[in-house]
Image: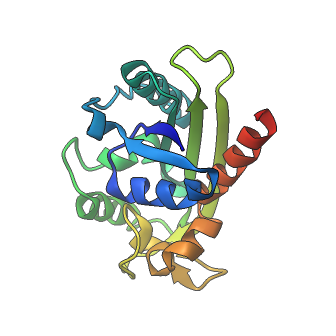
Amino acid sequence: MQKLVLASNNAGKVKEFQALLAPLNFQIIPQGELGIPSAEEPHHTFVENALAKARHASAASGLPALADDSGICVHALNGMPGVISARYAGDHCDDAANNLKLIDALRNHPDRGAHYVCALVFVNSANDPEPIIVQTRWYGQIVELAAGTNGFGYDPHFFLPDQNLTAAQLEPAQKNLISHRGQALRELITQLKSRA
């Protein structure tokens, strides 16, 4: 079983990645278990932040690393919260505060269109000249009333018209099939297999 450092300590993400990567025989180790602090995320794009996090985790651990940078882009807000989705309401805020701020910001906007973005980066080493980079989108709408308990982040407010459910109402296995992270991970797995 190959060890792989996940450049995240987000419990929701760790759980999703462990489930999605189990068939590839990777042992996922969250960077916090190795005492690796979070990397800085100063960039304006998901890809740049994910690459910085992957290189940081690999350099600190000496192992291959996987990082994602993901968030929600709301059309009426010119793509905000975007790369600051996790700290939209402030540096030490929680999901509830972020959702409250988003709903408030959309109060006078009829356009509720939004999409989740996942930029996923895999590096064999900190200086890998050919990182695998995948970026995917998952489209939906922001609804005012939260529904569901299975998700995290903005999931209770992210409504999927084709499912007639919010992301937080999906069963985890179903979410992994259609989510931005699930899409990105399947593409990453395809690329990893092609390099083997």
| Residue 13 percent across, percent down from the top left | 42, 54
Residue 11, image quadrant: bottom left
**Which residue is rendered at x = 62% and y = 80% of the image?**
161
Q: Residue furthest right?
A: 194
Looking at the image, can residue 179 be seen?
yes
What percent of the width, then of the height, locates residue 143? 45, 75
Residue at position x 50%, y 41% in the image: 68
For the residue pair 173 and 168, the one nearer the viewer reads as 173
Position of 1 relative to 148 (above/below): above
Choose top left, top right, bottom left or bottom right for residue 129.
Answer: top right
**Along the horizontal axis of the image, is 115 left or right of 189?**
left
Which residue extends farthest left?
92
The outermost residue toward the front is 1
Question: In terms of depth relative to the viewer, which is nearer, 62 or 164?
Answer: 62
Left or right side of 153 for 50: right
Indicate the quadrant containing the C terminus: top left, top right, bottom left or bottom right: top right
Which part of the image, by quadrant, shows the N terminus? top right
Measuring from the top left, give residue 111's x and y in whole percent: 55, 66
Q: Position of residue 195 (x, y in %)?
A: 77, 33
